[in-house]
Amino acid sequence: MIKKIVAFTTLSPLLLIIMDYPASIERILPTAASIVGYIGLIMILWSIILGSKPLARLISSDYVELNKTHRFLGKYGILFALIHPFLEMFSYLENISWVITPSLATEFDFHISLGRLTLLVFLIIWLSSITLRSKLKYRPWLRIHYLTYPLGLLALFHIRDIGFYYTQSRFISVFFSLILIAYCFYLAYLFLLWAGFFKNHYTVKSISKIGQGSEINILDLETTGKPLTSQPGQYVYIQMHRFGEVKPFSILENDGNKLRLGIKNDGEFTSRVGELKPGHEIGVFGPLGKFTQQGHNDSDKIIISGGIGITPLVELSEKYFTPNSFFFVCNRYRSDVVDLDRLKKSTNNRLYEVYSRETTIENERQRNCRLDKNVLQEILGSNNINNYKIFICGSSPFMNEAIKNLTSLGVKRENIYTEEFSF
């Protein structure tokens, strides 16, 4: 559905131009430039909107699909953004320096330069997200990505001031005027959200630390207002201070007024989480996501967690674990496992612990190795594992290896569900 909505609104400028202002022969090139520019603008705006969870969740709950569409629009919207100024260059009989050289000589030149600035900002964002993403750390990349918000305004004011069809076509004028108004409300909403509004507020009840191979903070929160209602596998964004950074974390437990998160200490933000004191108020936005949704029933399951990837799977096992299901918890050390006692209680002796560095083995359901094809085959035995729904969460290498091992045992890929992070 989301793809149909995006396609319709992206192609709307073309339909509106044809309906309202048929192009003459001498205006074929300027018309083509306008259409390409309008389509590129809509693609950019959709990319911005779908990249923002607060608004995107009003469109669809499938955040993985939303994120894929967001990336597709950003990746290929650059083509229209690049083609547009070159078509205008040919239309004005200018040379290539005209495309990149800013000019403030006249009001008309100023508005064209807004378009040049829009293109430059878009190129910076595009290069940081498509070409340089693997080389940039998260925080610098995020700050560059914030340029998307003024980018939308620059593009809208660029066409508002000099767009031919904007000034000549009633439909186009109304269409983009409404978009401009809506975009301004959207920016105002994001600012208020950043300021701490439209969030559920919780206070820190306690923080406990576990882990030998890595430090994990177990954050216990209590609501000071309306509690969140969530399903197993969902996640929330937390904000420790107004106008502060926000980050997403899977819900470990949500029991009415109490919310529990397991957060691995692996960066500046997560280290600050570990320094919070009881009574500190934080903003919580969500819940989001639909991982494990296919397992919210009495079907038999194979659940595989790696490291902190256990957090969205604990509630799934408590609420929907069946007598024939299996749970594989993989970690370096036993002390790194979040809520191990809870898992033992909910899985009824169907929990298998696989530790890569643990030397003390207590029973036949523990292994000192990595989870490979042989371990899976030994434990699952003669069960027809294609009758199971399989849920995997962990690091990307861990999940890829688990999928490879399972498919080598004959598991169909469509029976495997992974946490494809949509944040």
Image: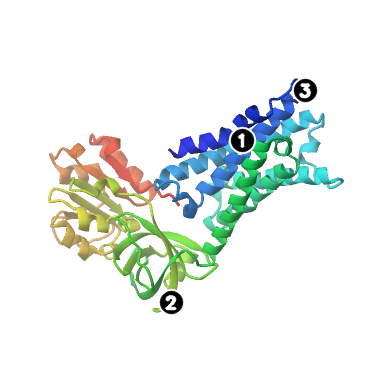
The numbered mark at residue 280 is 2
| Corner quadrant of residue 372 | top left
In x, y percent, where is residue 159?
A: 70, 42
Mark 1 = which residue?
A: 39
- Give the secondary structure at mark 2: loop
Q: Please tell me in which quadrant of the rendered image residue 314 appears.
A: bottom left
Distance CA(mark 3)–CA(mark 2) = 67 Å
- The numbered mark, 3 or 1, whose residue comes first in the sequence reads 3
Q: Foreground mark, 3 or 2?
A: 3
Q: Residues within 10 Å of mark 1 (few under 14, many from 20)?
A: many
Left or right: 43, with 422 as reference point: right
Residue 93 position in % (x across, y down): 82, 29
Judge the density around disc 2: few (<14), some (14-19), many (≥20) Cα neighbours within 10 Å: some
Residue 211 in view here: no
* For discs 2 and 1, the disc positioned in front in the rendered view: 1
| Element at label 3 | helix
How busy is the neighbourhood of tag 3: few (under 14 within 10 Å), some, or many (20 plus)? few
In the rendered view, tell whether residue 320 sits above or below residue 19: below
Q: CA distance from mark 3 to mark 1?
A: 22 Å
> Residue at (59%, 40%) from the top-left corner?
42
